[in-house]
Image (cartoon, helix red, strand yellow):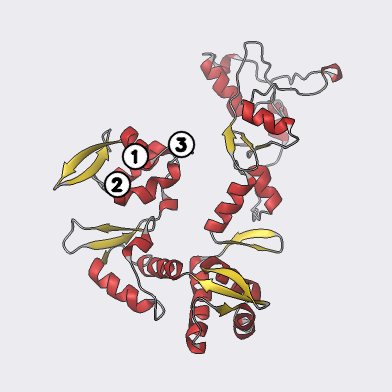
Amino acid sequence: MERTRAEVDATLQTAKLDAAELLPAAHCLRFGPAAAGDVCLLELEPALCGRLQAGRSLVIRGDKDEQAVLCSEDKTYDLKVADTSNMLLFIPGCKIPEQLKMEETHCNIIHTEYTTEDLLDQIQASEEEIMTQLQVLNACEIGGYWRILEFDYEMKLLNHITQLVDSESWSFSKVPLNTCLQELGPLEPEEMIEHCLKCYGKKYTEEGEAYFELSADKICRATAQMLLQNAVKFNLAEFQEVWQQSVPEGMTTRLDQLKGLALVDRQSRPEIIFLLKAEDLPEGDQERFNSLFSLREKWTEEDIAPYIQDLCGEKQTIGALLTKYARSSMQNGVKVYNSRRPIS
């Protein structure tokens, strides 16, 4: 098993050894050819063993600075390493201090672009989970590489489409793909027009022609984000009026379209609304709750649910998370939740 310098330092700390008392150079120890390479024993639950016995595959994923995970076609599992007292330490690419002094330091700026294969190699999730999240992020594949469009550009594309729908008096449930590409192709790349249609609609075929049914909820939500991203706080009544005026005719705005995107403060006078995107919050459970309770001392389940929904495991509920990380009480006849620990 190979370990990085950081992992070696952590092992020294656990063993209560002072690195300064050790020799300045380390020797790399490796097994000889007779050991038949690096071998690790992997203990699996019966269901996963059954997958392998049935001829299906499992993949170990994770970048170099991450904890590796094991992925099946549709699920992700943590990998735990059980250290034994006779495990050897190996430092990849180890060099003595004299060699390090002789090397020059080079700084390069690298523009990172990922293919699907790169994502599968490095991201700690199954292929199905990765592709689903790319769809959630409105990512697009261009020339074999995945990219995420800037929100302002995405809204520019959407505005072209909605204006064309209005000028042609089309139904939002039946937007013809080929006509869109022909009319808007001179303005923006055709693949970007089609990508935007996929982000905000559902493709179907009728009599050999491709159409898109655009989602009013998605368009209203994106319009609200455009309005809110330029304001710290927005008078709720004024926002609702401007929001309704900003969406295409025939669409109706509702606050429930903004779950996980914006938060309404009904305790303030006048009531206000502000942008709060779930994806911008910390990923860890405790850190997520700390962040939420630092924003607001007490939450109703309805308000907090969109911001913790993604933390729920396969057999975990929002109620169970709230029980673990929050205390409940009644306020004006409504159950509210506050932090179990002091928030600094």
Q: Residues within 10 Å of mark 2 (few under 14, many from 20)?
A: some
In this rendering, position of residue 190 left or right of residue 315:
right
Name above or below for residue 329 compared with residue 163: above
Quadrant in the picture for the N terminus? top right
What type is the residue that disc 1 sits on? Gly
Q: Looking at the image, which residue sits at the far right?
A: 33
Proximity of marks 3 and 1: CB atoms separated by less than 8 Å? no
Mark sitting on residue 301:
2
Quadrant in the picture for the C terminus? top left
Task: Give the Cα separation between the discs numbered 3 and 1.
Answer: 12 Å
- At 86% from the left and 17% from the top, the residue drawn is 34
Residue to which mark 1 is pinned: 319
Rendered image quadrant of residue 71: top right
Rendered image quadrant of residue 246: bottom left
Q: Residues within 10 Å of mark 3 (few under 14, many from 20)?
A: few
Task: Give the Cα separation between the discs numbered 1 and 2.
Answer: 8 Å
What type is the residue that disc 3 sits on? Lys
